[in-house]
Image: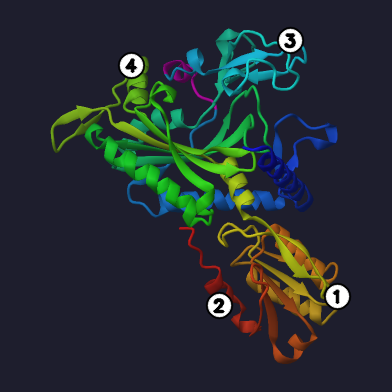
């Protein structure tokens, strides 16, 4: 990016990080102890936002499909799993150190042959394994070493035969999983984009070898389209096909879904044709036959695997950045001022509706509490009676709430409330008993 674009991107990222802390989306982990590098805690709104992203992904890929089932595999697995998968031997990044300022960098990320921070001389690159180790049981020795999984995929591969036998599925079909993974990254950073603890949303789609290319084409297009259906701006998202020399050793082909973050284009999700590499490795290493027997053709084969692998944290960050906007709105005196607003797709918005009584005292507050109690079983909602109505609108705009419901003294007489739209700031006056039908209609979302 050009210098001015980088500066604008940096300013936007700083504004978003500040908003996340101020409004309770993301906090630095262990902050009262000075924090721990590249670890983050999701606050009240961030927790709901991330859960909404995962729920939308699960609904699309599991609930609404006949050819997909779910799995929740263990984080700790037999260490031989990681030997067979190649992680013990080759799951590593090239690491260099600056001899002057002592900072460390991934060699494959550097565009110069000197330290990007101080211009000092760099050491020769050496490989650094990214897996975390721990010990199982009371004795800390080599026999007790286990690895904390660096990806969720291997839990799916080793359960392929179990799922095949119990689900009565046959290729082509998929297994989906959402779960934590851990990588001892050399250069974590850029807020929640690259962290050592993260959550993946992965599909392993098992297909007859001669259908692999067809399903690969299907899945990279489908995954790109999902982000758009969930409200992501089309100009901020793209597909990038891997060059042959950057393909992983197991991949015959791969696309990345990339998002235009404030710091530049970067990967949101990878869609790879992993061939039969993983099942073949585990079949050889374990000595167990995990091939699929096709009764119709009287053949036995190891399916090829198409893998759409997304990061829940990266997707949440991208949706948050994409939603961030600044415009102008009148203050309490009618003077135009800057307004920060998160324009989430309504299905992703953490809070769908906020109930705002104009005054705290009864009987107005009693009516407002009753309205809130009626909404809560159906939608995530919030009751806010602190501060002027203008300031409360601004708070709800900054957390992306689509609708604010204001109860005033006239509501006691005409049984009506005022509903304000987040994006247009247009206000409608409707009867109290029509609030839920109104929200049901308005909150219908294209994020399917």
Q: Are marks 3 and 1 in contact (CB under 8 Å)?
A: no
Residue 260 is situated, as x and y percent measured from the top left of the image, at 57, 43
The residue lying toward the viewer, choosing from 131 and 220, is 220
Residue 81 highlighted magenta (yes or no): yes
Q: Report, in whole angstroms, how far the alpha carbon at label 1 lies from the one at label 2.
A: 33 Å
Q: Which mark is residue 99?
A: 3
Whether tag 1 and tag 4 are in contact, CB under 8 A, the answer is no
- Dot 3 or dot 1: first in sequence order is 3
SS state under label 1: loop
Where does label 4 land, which residue? 284
x and y percent of residue 280 in the render?
32, 21
Q: Residue 333 got which mark?
A: 1
Residue pictured at 49% horizontal, 12% vertical: 89
Q: Can you give x and y, in whole percent of width and height, for residue 19 in the image? A: 75, 50
Q: In the image, is 109 to the left or to the right of 59?
A: right
- Sequence-wise, the earlier of marks 1 and 4 is 4
Callout 1: 10 Å neighbours few (<14), some, many (20+)? few
Q: CA distance from mark 3 to mark 4?
A: 44 Å
Secondary structure under the numbered disc 4 in the rendered image: helix
What span is in magenta? 76-84
Q: Earlier in the sequence, mark 2 or mark 4?
A: 4
Q: Nearer the viewer, mark 2 or mark 4?
A: 2
- The residue beneath circle 2 is 437
Please say whether residue 108 is one of the residues in the magenta stretch. no
Question: Residue at the location (69% across, 53% down)?
Answer: 45
Distance from disc 3 to disc 2, alpha carbons, whole Å, reads 66 Å
Residue at left offset 48%, top offset 34%:
73
């Amino acid at each position: 990016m050009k210098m001015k674009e980088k500066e604008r991107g940096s300013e936007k990222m700083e504004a978003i990080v500040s908003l996340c802390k101020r409004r309770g989306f993301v906090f630095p982990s262990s902050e009262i102890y000075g924090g721990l590098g590249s670890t983050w805690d999701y606050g009240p709104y961030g927790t709901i936002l991330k859960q909404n992203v995962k729920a939308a992904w699960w609904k699309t890929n599991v609930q609404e499909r006949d050819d997909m089932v779910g799995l929740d595999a263990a984080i700790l697995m037999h260490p031989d799993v990681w030997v067979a998968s190649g992680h013990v031997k080759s799951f590593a990044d090239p690491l260099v150190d600056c001899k002057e300022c002592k900072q460390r960098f991934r060699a494959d990320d550097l565009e110069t042959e000197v330290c990007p921070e101080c211009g000092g001389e760099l050491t020769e690159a050496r490989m650094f394994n990214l897996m975390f180790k721990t010990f199982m049981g009371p004795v800390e020795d080599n026999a007790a070493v286990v690895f904390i999984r660096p990806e969720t995929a291997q839990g799916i591969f080793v359960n392929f035969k179990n799922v095949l036998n119990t689900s009565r599925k046959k290729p082509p079909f998929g297994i989906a999983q959402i779960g934590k993974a851990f990588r001892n990254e050399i250069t974590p950073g850029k807020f929640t984009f690259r962290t050592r603890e993260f959550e993946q949303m992965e599909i392993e789609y098992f297909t007859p070898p001669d259908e692999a290319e067809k399903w690969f084409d299907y899945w990279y297009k489908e995954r790109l389209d999902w982000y758009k259906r969930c409200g992501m701006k089309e100009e901020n998202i793209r597909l990038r096909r891997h060059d042959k020399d950057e393909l992983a050793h197991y991949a015959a082909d791969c696309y990345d879904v990339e998002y235009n973050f404030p710091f530049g284009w970067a990967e949101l999700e990878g869609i790879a044709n992993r061939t039969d590499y993983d099942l073949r490795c585990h079949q050889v290493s374990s000595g167990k036959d995990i091939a699929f027997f096709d009764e119709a053709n009287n053949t036995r084969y190891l399916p090829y695997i198409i893998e759409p692998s997304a990061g829940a944290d990266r997707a949440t960050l991208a949706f948050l950045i994409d939603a961030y906007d600044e415009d102008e709105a009148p203050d309490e005196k009618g003077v135009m001022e800057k307004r920060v607003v998160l324009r989430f797709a309504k299905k992703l918005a953490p809070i769908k509706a906020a109930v705002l009584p104009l005054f705290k005292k009864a009987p107005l507050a009693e009516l407002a509490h009753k309205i809130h109690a009626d909404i809560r079983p159906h939608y995530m909602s919030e009751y806010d009676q602190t501060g002027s109505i203008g300031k409360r609108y601004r708070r709800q705009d900054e957390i992306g709430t689509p609708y604010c419901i204001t109860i005033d003294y006239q509501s006691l007489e005409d049984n009506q409330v005022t509903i304000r739209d987040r994006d247009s700031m247009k206000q409608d006056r409707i009867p109290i008993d029509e609030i839920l039908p109104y929200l049901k209609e308005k909150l219908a979302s294209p994020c399917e």
